[in-house]
Image (cartoon, helix red, strand yellow):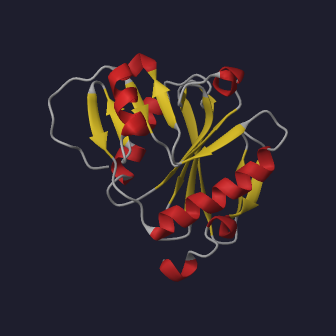
Amino acid sequence: MIATKSHAYFTPEEYLEIERISPIKHEYLQGQIVAMAGASKAHVIITGNLSALMVNHLRGTGCISYATDMKIRLPALNLFYYPDLVVTCDERDRLSNEDFIVHPKLIVEVLSDSTEAFDRGDKFANYKSIVEFEEYILIHQKQILVEQFQRQSDNLWVPQIYRLGDTIELMSIGFACPTEALYENVAQLI
């Protein structure tokens, strides 16, 4: 993520209005609008692979998977983020006409050099404030490595690492796949 230098304060409503017509995506950080950097080829392929697997897995479950262009709103913190992939199973999100969700169950970020520290740090800390949020996945794009964090209680998140040859298990949505499935067509880029 690349921050634009502006000290203007925008309300969430103004941000949403601007975002609807903007040719580029922005996140919203407590009144500041922050432009997002473009993604690498590996990043796009990994997100697409996972999205394809999710859509098929979630069919008929009442859960919906969104890739890259769905914002998560954290109203108590006055934030909007664009995760790489998010799953919601909450009826309030499914029935809402808003162009954001508020009750994600699973959030996935594909790590890049410019976003890794933020995705691991402040962003994860902020996501933890979401009551329905159960699982956070960080996918590396420069090596075959997936990090999983599962909520066990309000303040306890249990980590798990998956490498080449492992089967990833996303307990929040009852999903499993070989790690390699996420990296299909990416090996030559790593």
Residue at 14 percent across and 30 percent down: it is 7
Task: Looking at the picture, tell me which residue is in the foreground, 120 or 34.
Answer: 34
> Residue 130 location, x and y as percent?
53, 25
The extreme bottom residue here reads 188
Q: Quadrant of residue 145?
A: bottom right
The extreme front residue here reads 21
Residue at 33 percent across and 23 percent down: it is 14
> Residue 133 location, x and y as percent?
59, 30
Residue at 26 percent across and 49 percent down: it is 2
Check the image and report above or below for 15 versus 40: above
How many callouts does the rendering have?
0
Q: Quadrant of residue 94?
A: top right
Residue at 15 percent across and 40 percent down: it is 5
Is residue 167 visible to the viewer in this orientation of the structure?
Answer: yes
Task: Looking at the picture, tell me which residue is in the foreground, 24 or 58.
Answer: 24
> Residue 77 location, x and y as percent?
38, 21
Q: Is residue 21 left or right of residue 6?
A: right
Check the image and report above or below for 109 versus 165: above
Q: In this view, does 30 lie to the left or right of 52?
A: left
Is residue 122 visible to the viewer in this orientation of the structure?
Answer: no
> Residue 88 location, x and y as percent?
66, 33
The extreme top residue here reads 76
Task: Looking at the picture, tell me which residue is in the foreground, 166 or 3.
Answer: 3
